[in-house]
Image (tube, helix red, strand yellow):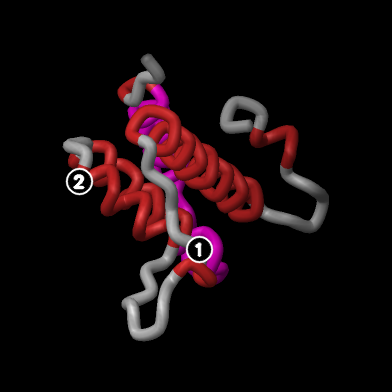
């Protein structure tokens, strides 16, 4: 998508639309990759909202994944996912703030770092 983004911009839409989509897809790709890695390699499963009991503090699934990466010694991958998460929030919830080409490139770079680091043995 990044290499072809100029061809993907629909009529009556600016570059922001495509940049936001690339960042969103980079985040969710990395998030789901981390979730799969944690489940397959570390046997960790997120708790869904209905899995929490009574007064137990409810923690969102995305935060559980970041915390699990930290717990299993993948602090740098937690940081990479956190950076992607912040970019994704900006892309999804701040439509009036520009998304720079550098931020798009950074998002793809963070995703690639995660993909290249976490191994399924």
- Figure quadrant of the N terminus: top right
Judging by the rendered image, the residue that carries numbered circle 2 is: 71
Ranked by sequence position, the earlier of labels 1 and 2 is 1
Which residue sits at x=57%, y=52%? 20
The overriding secondary structure of the stretch rendered in magenta is helix
Q: Which residues are magenta?
A: 89-115
Instruction: Tell me: 91 left or right of 115.
Output: right
**Where is 63 relative to 58, above or below?**
above
Q: Of residues 64 and 86, which is closer to you in this image?
A: 64
Name the residue rendered at 20%, 46% in the picture. 71
Q: Which type of secondary structure does the marked residue at label 2 adopt?
A: helix
Residue at 44% x, 30% y is 40
Numbered disc total: 2
| Circle 1 crowding by C-alpha within 10 Å: few under 14, some 14–19, many from 20 | few
Local crowd size for mark 2, using a 10 Å CA cut-off: few (<14), some (14–19), many (≥20)? few
Query: Which numbered disc covers residue 48?
Result: 1
- Name the residue located 37 percent from the left edge and 14 percent from the top edge: 121
């Amino acid at each position: 998508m990044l290499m072809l983004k100029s061809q993907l911009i629909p009529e009556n839409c600016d570059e922001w639309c495509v940049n936001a989509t690339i960042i969103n897809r980079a985040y969710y790709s990395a998030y789901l990759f981390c979730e799969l890695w944690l489940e397959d390699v570390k046997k960790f499963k997120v708790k869904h909202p209905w899995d929490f009991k009574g007064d137990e503090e409810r923690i969102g699934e995305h935060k559980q994944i970041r915390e699990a990466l930290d717990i299993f010694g993948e602090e740098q991958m937690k940081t990479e996912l956190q950076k992607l998460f912040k970019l994704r929030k900006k892309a999804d919830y701040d439509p009036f703030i520009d998304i720079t080409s550098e931020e798009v490139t950074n998002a793809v770079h963070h995703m690639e770092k995660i993909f290249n680091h976490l191994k399924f043995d």
